[in-house]
Image (spheres, grey):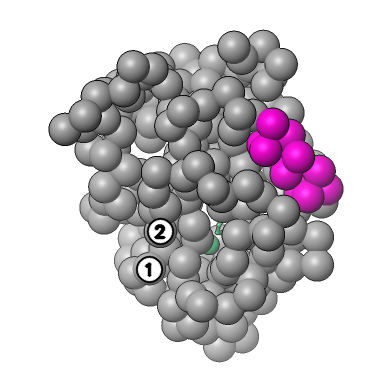
Amino acid sequence: MEKLNQSKALIIVDVQYDFLPGGSLAVNDGDLIIPVINELQEKFEFIVATQDWHPADHQSFASNHLGKRPGNMIDLHGLDQILWPDHCVQYTKGAQFSADLNQSNWESIFQKGTNPEVDSYSGFFDNARRGDTGLGDFLKEKGVETIYICGLALDYCVKFTAMDGKSLGFDTYLVTDATKAVNLAPEDGDLALKEMEEAGIHLITSSEIE
Ligand code: VGL
Ligand code: ZN
């Protein structure tokens, strides 16, 4: 396997229409990070993306539980599960990456959330830590040691991807100006940053990256 001369990788998390203004699970101002991510991509030779990719019967959707609404909590096979609006259903427009996002230099796309019985916030593992997307092995086989995470949403998929990356031994950076929180509670984004810092994840802005 060919090794990289640079050991750093950029991971772009879930920049898909349903998480952008007008989408079913929109992050306020989520579109404002797209030009920032496009500029950031110029600094990387190795870029991968994750894609939330749910079947229509996914059990994280409130619509699949009689009498439940988005924001309600349920127990899903022993895990606490927040119920979401239907989003990122496979092959729908909402599941597509924004056309404004430069996708021309991506090595690979890692899809997640395909098992209807478990949610999957992280780009590495599902929330039960059973299913593995292959992203961790892929990065290690390529000699990647340092990962930079950006995308949507800071308080869910970005945070979980960064935390799993760190736990797998990658030196992990969160690019703070290239992410936005969905903020179901107004403090969620700030809490996510704090949790990541406490886990040893470095917070960095894109202008600080060489
Ligand atoms: C996400 C909630 C449900 C995300 C995905 O990409 O942050 N959030 N599915
Ligand atoms: Zn999802």
Residue 47 lies within the magenta run: no
Judge whether residue 152 can be spotted in this image.
Answer: yes
In the shown orientation, is residue 130 left or right of residue 82? left
Residue that numbered label 2 is attached to: 111
- In this view, which residue lies farthest toward the bottom? 66
Quadrant of image for the C terminus: top right
Magenta stretch in the rendered image: 29-39
Q: Is residue 101 above or below residue 180?
A: below
Q: Is mark 1 within 8 Å of ligand 2?
A: no
Q: Quadrant of residue 46?
A: top left
Q: Position of residue 194 (x, y in %)?
A: 62, 22
Task: Give the residue type at disc 1.
Answer: Thr
Front position in the image: 208 or 171: 208
Q: Are marks 1 and 2 in contact (CB under 8 Å)?
A: yes
Q: Pointer 1: residues within 10 angstroms few (<14), some, or many (20+)?
A: some
- Foreground: disc 1 or disc 2: 2
Q: Quadrant of residue 117?
A: bottom left
Residue at the location (73% across, 34% down)?
36
Quadrant of image for the N terminus: top left
Q: Disc 1 versus disc 2: distance between alpha carbons?
A: 7 Å
Residue that numbered label 1 is attached to: 114
